[in-house]
Amino acid sequence: MRGSAPEDEKRFHRPALRRSTTAIAAALLLLPLSGAPSASAGQPRTDRLQQAFTEAAARFHVPRSVLLGVSYLESRWDGHAGAPSVSGGYGPMHLTDARTALAGAPEFSEGNEDARGDSSRARKRVPAGAVQQATLPAELPARMRTLATAARLTGLPAKRLRTDPASNVLGGAALLAAAQRKLGLPASGDPARWYGAVARYGDQDSASGGKAFADEVFAVMRQGQARTNDAGQRVTLAAAPGLAPDAGQQKRLGTPSDPAARAARRRLECPRSVACESVPAPYEEFGDNDYGNHDKADRPRDQKINSIVIHDTEGPWDVTLKLIKDPTYVSWHYTIRSADGLIAQHVPTKDVAWHAGNWYLNAHSIGIEHEGFLAAPDAWYTEAMYRASAHLVKYLSHKYDVPLDRQHILGHDNVPGTTTSTIAGMHTDPGPYWDWAHYFALLGKPFHAAPGHHGGLVTIRPDYGANKPRYTGCEKPGDTCAPHGSGAVRLYTAPSESAPLVKDIGLHQDGSDSTQGVNDTGARATTGQRFAVAGRSGNWTAIWYLGQRAWFRNPADAPTAVNARGLVATPKEGRTQIPVYGRAYPERDAYPEGVPYQAVSPLPYKLAAGQSYVIGGRVRGEYFYSPTFDVSEHEVVRGDDVYYEIQLGHRVGYVRAADVEVHRSDPE
C-alpha cells in the first residue's frame, strides 16, 4: 500500500514500526538443550533446533513430524532473532503475544496520492485529518495471544518463549497437545490423528477456520522439507508421501452444513484449497457526485486482465478491514492475513479496484494486499501467508490467463507513474524484503537459468538469505536497517561498489543521486526481473536500465543473475532515441464525442539506439472511461496504437510498437 513520498495514495504513511524490537533482535543464541552433547569450542551446534523438536515431541507426546510441519508453515523454522511477525507472533512456532509485539506501533496517516491514477476526474483524496491507530481491542481473540497460554502450559516465562527458539518449540508442542485434548482425542503417534489439533492451532478461535492451514501442513509433511534457517540451524522433515488426514476429523472440518454459508463460499473467487471470506468494499454514492470505492465493470469481456499486483497493507489486519469498508476510501480485491493465510475478498474481479495509482494498470489488474510492513525487515511474513497467496495467484492466473512471470505478477513498486509528475509519488511496496524467489517457487515457476553461457539476457536471482545489501530509513531517515535477506541487487554506473549508483531522473527530478533508502527504487533490480545485457567485466554484469548502462556484482562463484531468453525491443533503425510511457492509452482519433482525450504523455526516460529491453507483452491502446456512479455512462475506448510492455527499470513501462524492432535473444 505504501509509497516512498509524503503523498501516499493510501492512508498508511511510511511504517516506522517502532516496536522497540531492536533490543529483542540482538544476536540471540539457542540455549543448550538438556542431555545434548556440547559442541566443540568455536564450533556452534547446527542441530540444536532439530533436537529441540525431538525433545518437545517426546515431552508432550506430539509426533515430531506434526510439530515440524506446523512450524514450517508458520516460520520456515526461522527464529527472526526474537523479533515478532507482523501479526505479533514469535519464534519458530509463531507464538502470538500481540500486546507486547504491537506496543508503541505507529499511526497510519493518510496521504493524498490518487489511487485511481485517472486524470479525467478529480483526484481521489482521503478526507483530511483521517488517522488510523494500530489499536487493539480490550479482549484479544485467541489467535493473538497463544504465547500466554503456552507459558501457562509449560511453566516457562513469556520472555523466554519469545526469545529462545528451543523454548518456543516446547510452547508450540504444548499448544498442540492441549488442542488434541480439547477435541477429546487421545495422544497418538500417528500424525494423521492430529489433523483437527493442527487446524485449531492454525485458527484458535474456530475449530473449522483452520482447515486450510491443516491441509497445507499435511501437504508439507507429505512433501518433506530440509532447510538451514536464519540462525544457521539445519532442520529436516522427512517426506511421508502416503500421509492422509484422519477421514473423520477431515469430514468434520469440511464443507459448511449451513446452505447459506455454502452459497456464500461459492460466490467467492478463491481456490478451494484456501480459507476465504467475504468482506465487501462498498459501492456507494455520496455527496458532490462522488462515489466509492471502486468501479463497476465487466472484465474480462470488456477489458483483459493481464496482471496481478502484490501489495502490503502497512497496517494490521483489523485496521485494513476497517478501511476497505469505508466508501470514501480506496480499494483492492483481496487481503491476506499473516497469521494463518486467511483471504478476504472485497471487490469482484470483474470490477476495477483503485489500488495501483495507475489507471491503465488498475483497469487491467487484480490487487492483492498482504498484511505487513515493507520497511520492517523483521516484521516477517509467515509461510502460511506466502502459500495462501500463491494458491490465490495460481487460481487467478488460470482463470484469466495471466502469465506467471515478473512482468505480469508485479509488485506495487513495479507499477510505473502515469506521467513525469507522478513518478516520485508511486508506491514502493512490498519492498526489497519480499521473497520473490520463494514466492515463485510456490507458484510452481521457479527462476531457472536458461542453458548456455553469457547470453544476451539475464534473470536477477540472488541468494535471498545471503544477499543482504545495506538499506537505510527503516525506522528513521538515515538510520541503517537491520541486516536482512533481500531479493534486490544494487546498480552502479561502473563495475565497482565505489562508483555512484545509477540515476533515476524521474524519481530524483532535482538531479540528485539514487540512495540506499529502503524506499528508493532508482538503482535496484529485483529477483525474477529480466534485463538485456549491456556489458561484462570480471565479476560484474551490466544491463540496460532506464536508458543507461547499469552494473551489478555477479561473481561466478556466487551469481546474482542467471542466463535468460526472451523477446527484446530495440529502437527502430534510424532512430537515435525513442520515448517510453507509463500507460498504454489510445491515439486521439479513437476517442468518441463525450469522452475526454487522455494525452499519451512520455516519461522523462529515453531509450537510445543500440539499447535493448525485455518485452513482457503486447497490448492494444485502451482507456476505460468511468467517471460516474451510473455504469451506463462507462465506456471502453480502443485505438489502433499497439504497445509493448518492457522491463524499463525497477518498474515496467510501455513503448509504441511503431517505434521499436522486436527480436529474440537466447543464451549462446
Image (cartoon, rainbow, N blue to C red):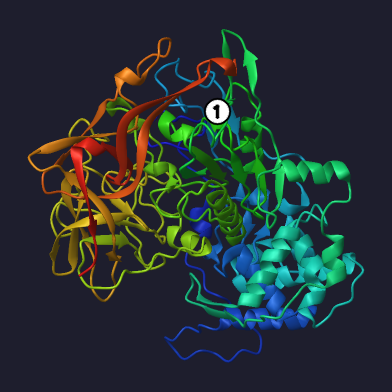
Q: Is residue 432 left or right of residue 391?
A: left
Q: Residue furthest front?
A: 640
Is residue 400 depicted above or below 356 in this figure?
below
Q: Is residue 358 visible?
A: no
What's the amino acid at mark 1? Val
Q: Nearer the viewer, residue 540 or 4?
A: 540
Q: Which residue has dot 1 on it?
A: 330
Give the quarter of the figure containing the C terminus: bottom left
Q: Residue furthest top?
A: 288
Percent across and percent down for residue 303 are 49, 33
Is residue 70 depicted above or below 111 in this figure?
below
Q: Is residue 661 left or right of residue 44?
A: left
Percent across and percent down for residue 152 are 79, 64
Residue at 27% in and 61% down: 458
Percent across and percent down for residue 503 are 20, 42
Q: Is residue 531 left or right of residue 623?
A: left
